[in-house]
Amino acid sequence: MASLRKATAYSKKIVVPFTRVSKKRQKSYIKTVPHQKIVKFTMGREDLYNQGKFPHELTVISTEKVQLRHNALEACRQYINKKVETELVGQYVFRVIPFPHHIQRENKMLTGAGADRMQTGMQLSYGKSVGKAAILKKGSKIFFVAVPNERAVHFTRKVFKQIKAKLPGKTKILYEFKK
């Protein structure tokens, strides 16, 4: 598998959503759709959350307009879920909120000797689909965790601070206590 371009090639660009996939091949702009990397969107004990057992809620939100790739979301999801599950063992609910619909394209460029004879440059530069992304507006929620007590809140906040490096743009952690 070819390596991915740096996220900076996509993350802060102003973009029009590219999502047109149709069952009829003629009407579909996107011929090949990359598979979804995010395996689960909800983890933990949803039933206990609905009963009101987890009053402490933490949410990671984006403070700027940004594109968030599905592989970055999946990497963060795995890290958060592993840390929180080992510490709180079934006493939490965790959700990944954005769903990546936007399909990103790449115009492959060759490098090295003789490459100029093989590529077209910017002529026919539409590009092939390489991945998916969620287009986030300022104030969009990214991750949500509900936990039972204050000790769990401090631990979860620490885990959220550790994943900030994996996310593009600036993020903020919101805390809410519900009775």
Image (spheres, rainbow, N blue to C red):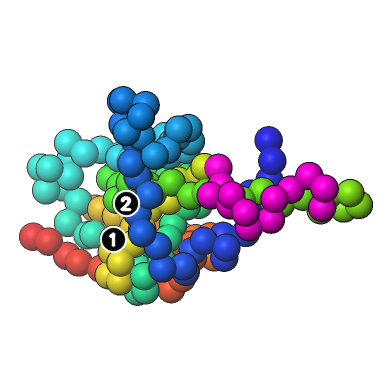
Residue 150 percent location from the top left of the image: 28, 63
Marked residue nearer the N-terminal end (1 or 2): 2
Q: Main secondary structure of the magenta part?
A: loop
Mark 2: which secondary structure? loop
Report which residue position mark 1 lands on: 141
Q: Amino acid at mark 1?
A: Lys
Picture layout, residue 45 above or below residue 169: above
Indicate whether residue 129 is drawn in magenta: no
Q: Which mark is residue 9?
A: none
The answer to the question of whether label 1 and label 2 lie on touching residues, with beta carbons closer than 8 A, is: yes
For this view, does 162 lie left or right of residue 156?
right
Residue 127 percent location from the top left of the image: 56, 47
Task: Give the residue displayed 33% in from the left and 41% down from the top.
Answer: 20
Residue 30 percent location from the top left of the image: 42, 38
| Residue interval drawn in magenta | 116-128
**In the foreground, 76 or 169:** 169
- Residue 160: image quadrant is bottom left
